[in-house]
Amino acid sequence: MTGPNMWLARPWSERRSGETDTRRGDWRRWYERDRARIIHSSAFRGLQTKTQLLGIGGSDFHRTRLTHSLETAQISQSIVGKLAADASLPEAARDVLPPPALMEAIALAHDLGHPPFGHGGEIALNRCMRRHGGFEGNGQTLRLIARLEAHSGPFGLDLARRTLLGVLKYPRPRSRDPWPAEAAMDAPMRAADWRPVKSLFDADLPVVDWIFAPFTPDERALIEASRADGTDFRALDTSLLELADDIAYGVHDLEDAIVLRLIAPDQVHALWHDHRNDVAGLDGAPTDAAIAALFADDSARKRAVGLLVNFFVVHIGLRRENARVCPLLAWTGVLAQPAATLLRALIDLLRRQVIEQPVVQMLEFRGQDIVRRLFDTIAGDPARFLPTVWRGRWRASGDETEALRTICDYISAMTDEQATRNFELLFAARGGGMAFGVL
């Protein structure tokens, strides 16, 4: 097939199972079906009680991984709509644009593999799996949607090839990068010692081989040569996802911090003073009044947040990075300067004034400790502590690495609340009630 639809049809619409049938009268195409599978998955529901910026339970207002994913999906669709309406976009780029349903599916799925307690849980599981391939949330997302989630047996959600490619943020096997010198295991669990490398699990490389099958050897080599931070080479859809993710974090999570009084007006006004002249005159640029409205009543704040999101979306375009590869890899989404500088400044402000604050780091460490102790306890006697389904998977493991990966899969699927309840049942003097259930 050639023409505008070639990047949406085969081989990009194919599923690993080979499934081609649709239900009688089902009007949906491949990516609408992918979106539905993600929304109805247990992993997606679990995001409602997984940490985004702050721990769950401290407030009914602030965002979770679920609301963040929904906001990222909405922004992703806005980006695609803006690009499709851009008359200056070259026809070659327009032909490869993802449809809204595909972009929404990718965004809804992008955080499914993140464990309880955010990066704290990720650090703990990476430490626990240090001799067995490590742990990384984005790698777990691919593993979950392509292998673990209940829908199509060993194929997970059995999503279309282009959907899986879009979720593949860090297309680099973990074994490509050496492990750092191992910290003493009896020493305190310093986060800096165990931050995971952004990568895929080597055990899931057969899935990656299938995703990359339509590419030429040279195209695949370019993808796999990407640095561990993923900045060198990505598919178009992934680059658009990353922009939407950054906007959702830098603007919507900023709203959380403002409402919870973790960021003061003078801090935002000082940042705005540094960048105001650079963005003045650009289409949709914020004004002094809009920035002040972030600290006004709810209605004014919502309008200001919407204005900021729109400003960043308006200044997203496409750039051709490499003319020697297929269009799906050649084009990438970019946020024009100085809008990109302003967004990065907002993200840095959140990091300094929220994430790096001692009380937030203490909560993160608490989550790390819960996850680590759960892993050590369950790994010490899996037949005793694993629920029935997971116990069966553990017993079917071919070696120690696969067995420990099953325990890691089980714990990473827990919500913050499930992990806390299980921890209290095991270790608290007055823990009670059934906590494990079936995930």
Image: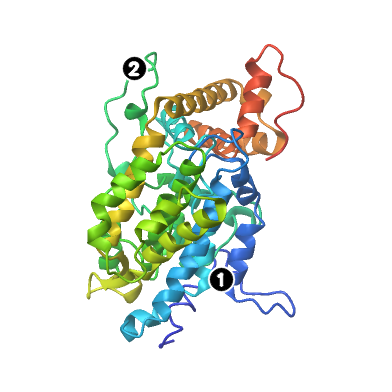
Vertical placement of residue 56 versus 4, above or below: above
Picture coordinates of residue 51, whole percent (x, y): 53, 39
Picture coordinates of residue 363, whole percent (x, y): 49, 26
- Image side of residue 24 versus residue 360, left or right: right
Vertical placement of residue 131 versus 428, above or below: below
**For the residue marked with disc 1, what is the amino acid?**
Tyr
The quarter of the picture where the C terminus appears is top right
- Image side of residue 84 versus residue 430, left or right: left
Q: Quadrant of residue 203?
A: top left
Among numbered discs 2 and 1, the one appearing first in the sequence: 1
Viewer-proximal residue among 399 and 428? 428
Viewer-proximal residue among 210 and 89? 89
Circle 1 — which element? helix
On the image, numbered disc 1 is attached to which residue? 31
Q: How far is mark 2 from mark 1, CA to CA?
A: 47 Å
Vertical placement of residue 317 versus 37, above or below: below
On the image, numbered disc 2 is attached to which residue? 184
Q: Residue at x 58, y 57 (%)?
A: 155
- Image side of residue 329 versus residue 418, left or right: left
For the rendered model, the colour scheme is rainbow
**For the residue marked with disc 2, what is the amino acid?**
Ala
Picture coordinates of residue 319, whole percent (x, y): 27, 72
Q: Is residue 215 visible from the viewing direction of this image?
A: no
Viewer-proximal residue among 37 and 421? 421
Q: Of the residues tagged 2 and 1, which is closer to the observer?
A: 1
Circle 2 — which element? loop
Label at residue 276 = none
Q: Residues within 10 Å of mark 2 (few under 14, many from 20)?
A: few
Vertical placement of residue 38 versus 27, above or below: above
